[in-house]
Image: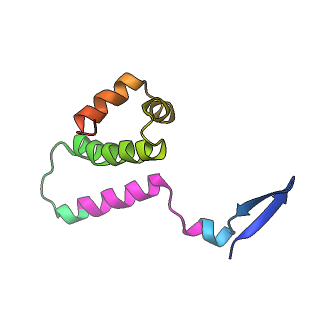
Amino acid sequence: MTNYSVEQDVETPVASFEQEADKNTLKQCVTEVMENYLRDMDGHQTHDLYKMVLAEVEQPLLETILKHTRGNQSQAAEILGINRGTLRKKLKEYGLL
């Protein structure tokens, strides 16, 4: 059940402490996934892990932000904190343009 806080005639959802405790931060999620990945490698060597992880994260990040901005590249670049030219370069790199 969602609790609501009413301030200045505006209802704002307030999550309970228990609900917040169950949510993982992005950092926690990445840590868990990387620990699982390395455990699953079972001692096998891995190469270019940094590049692989960035590609696995960057493409869905770009797709999600573009969807959120309804394709507005200027807004997407602003949200991401990069310039529009860099965004376009990355979109081309992943075949999203």
Taking depth in this image into account, of 3 and 52 the one nearest to the observer is 3
Q: As drawn, which residue projects farthest toward the right? A: 8
**In this view, 21 is above or below 64:** below
Please report the residue visible at 44 percent of the width from the left and 43 percent of the height from the top.
Answer: 65
**In this view, 31 is above or below 51:** below
How many discs appear?
0
The image quadrant where one finds the N terminus is: bottom right
The image quadrant where one finds the C terminus is: top left
The picture quadrant where one finds residue 90 is: top left
Please report the residue visible at 41 percent of the width from the left and 48 percent of the height from the top.
Answer: 64
* Image: magenta residue range: 21-38
Q: Is residue 23 left or right of residue 95?
A: right
The picture quadrant where one finds residue 54 is: top left
**Can you give x and y, in whole percent of width and height, for residue 61 in the image?**
38, 45
Taking depth in this image into account, of 40 and 1 the one nearest to the observer is 1
Q: As drawn, which residue projects farthest toward the left? A: 44
**Can you give x and y, in whole percent of width and height, for residue 31 in the image?**
39, 56
Please report the residue visible at 28 percent of the width from the left and 48 percent of the height from the top.
Answer: 56
Taking depth in this image into account, of 5 and 29 the one nearest to the observer is 5
**In this view, 14 is above or below 53:** below
Q: Is residue 86 left or right of residue 39?
A: right
Taking depth in this image into account, of 17 and 72 the one nearest to the observer is 72
The picture quadrant where one finds residue 73 is: top left
The overriding secondary structure of the stretch rendered in magenta is helix
Q: Is residue 70 left or right of residue 96?
A: right
**Can you give x and y, in whole percent of width and height, for residue 18 in the image?**
64, 72
**Residue 86 included in the magenta stretch of the image:** no
